[in-house]
Image (cartoon, rainbow, N blue to C red):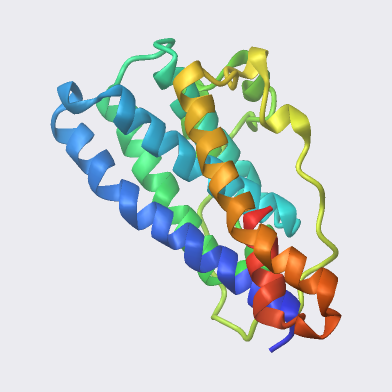
């Protein structure tokens, strides 16, 4: 297995953990909209933001696009621009299922459909994001059989507009921004000793260390 394969697998594993963690919260909201809290919406938003960022980095566009649309809807929910409704929670749950399906066939995911789910998210998206929604959702097709993961294409950079997009409803509130800063500082503190060790001994470099540095950044 190449390093690229391992990086992709790391992203898939981490993203699946995020989705497993938020699915019970979405099911709870489906039963009781009153269960929504600031902390819960931040948890949902951060999960989808992480999924989007990971797959944007490795250039898998369909997963990135669907996760971005779900993140956008959650951002508008967080900002009080849309209410919690059964149709919203239903399509978010469908989105979670589809992202999981795409991750199971990651290297074929860009040929698999996402526009049907993005289309259903349309009423809950910002005006800017709606411009990316197809006029008519595409039909759902069965995913291809699982295949051995091949090395991924060269990574694509994450656009700064993904992190701050006022028209798209993505501006970070103070508390969420503070959460991100705290988490980022923890990542940087964790890798600083590794970088200092590499400065003294380049031979200490290993695939595992590279993956650790990559995940932190």
Side of 19 relative to 161 (left or right) = left
The structure residue drawn at horizontal position 41% and vertical position 50%, both measured from the top left corner, is 96
Residue 151 screen position, x and y as percent: 76, 78
121 in relation to 6, above or below: above
Q: Where is the N terminus found, in terms of image quarters?
A: bottom right
In the shown orientation, is residue 37 left or right of residue 56?
left
Q: Is residue 30 above or below residue 17?
A: above
Visible residue check, residue 60: yes
- The image shows residue 134 at horizontal and vertical percentages of 65, 33
Residue 200 drawn above or below residue 134: below
Answer yes or no: is residue 114 visible.
Answer: no
Toward the viewer: 182 or 113? 182
Which residue is at 47% across, 39% downward? 46
Spot occupied by residue 54 in the image (x, y as percentages of width and height): 63, 54
Question: Which quadrant of the figure has residue 164?
Answer: top right
User: What x and y, as percent, mark residue 214?
Assistant: 70, 62
Q: Nearer the viewer, residue 151 or 217?
A: 217
Say which residue appears at 63% left-offset and 56% top-offset.
Answer: 216
In the figure, is residue 87 to the left or right of 31?
Answer: right
Q: Residue at x 65, y 60 (%)?
A: 191
């Amino acid at each position: 297995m190449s390093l690229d394969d391992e990086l992709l697998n790391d992203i898939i594993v981490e993203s699946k953990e995020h989705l497993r963690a938020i699915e019970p919260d979405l099911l709870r909201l489906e039963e009781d909209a009153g269960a929504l809290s600031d902390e819960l919406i931040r948890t949902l938003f951060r999960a989808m933001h992480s999924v989007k960022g990971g797959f944007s980095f490795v250039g898998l566009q369909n997963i990135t696009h669907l996760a971005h649309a779900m993140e956008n809807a959650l951002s508008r929910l967080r900002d009080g621009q849309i209410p919690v409704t059964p149709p919203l929670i239903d399509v978010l749950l469908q989105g979670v299922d589809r992202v999981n399906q795409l991750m199971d066939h990651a290297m074929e995911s860009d040929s698999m459909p996402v526009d049907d789910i993005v289309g259903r998210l349309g009423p809950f998206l910002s005006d800017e994001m709606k411009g990316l929604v197809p006029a008519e959702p595409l039909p759902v097709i069965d995913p291809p059989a699982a295949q051995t993961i091949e090395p991924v294409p060269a990574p694509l950079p994450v656009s700064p507009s993904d992190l701050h997009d006022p028209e798209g409803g993505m501006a970070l509130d103070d508390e969420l921004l503070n959460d991100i800063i705290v988490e980022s500082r923890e990542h940087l503190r964790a890798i600083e000793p590794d970088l200092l060790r590499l400065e003294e001994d380049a031979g200490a470099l290993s695939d595992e260390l590279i993956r650790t540095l990559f995940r932190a950044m």
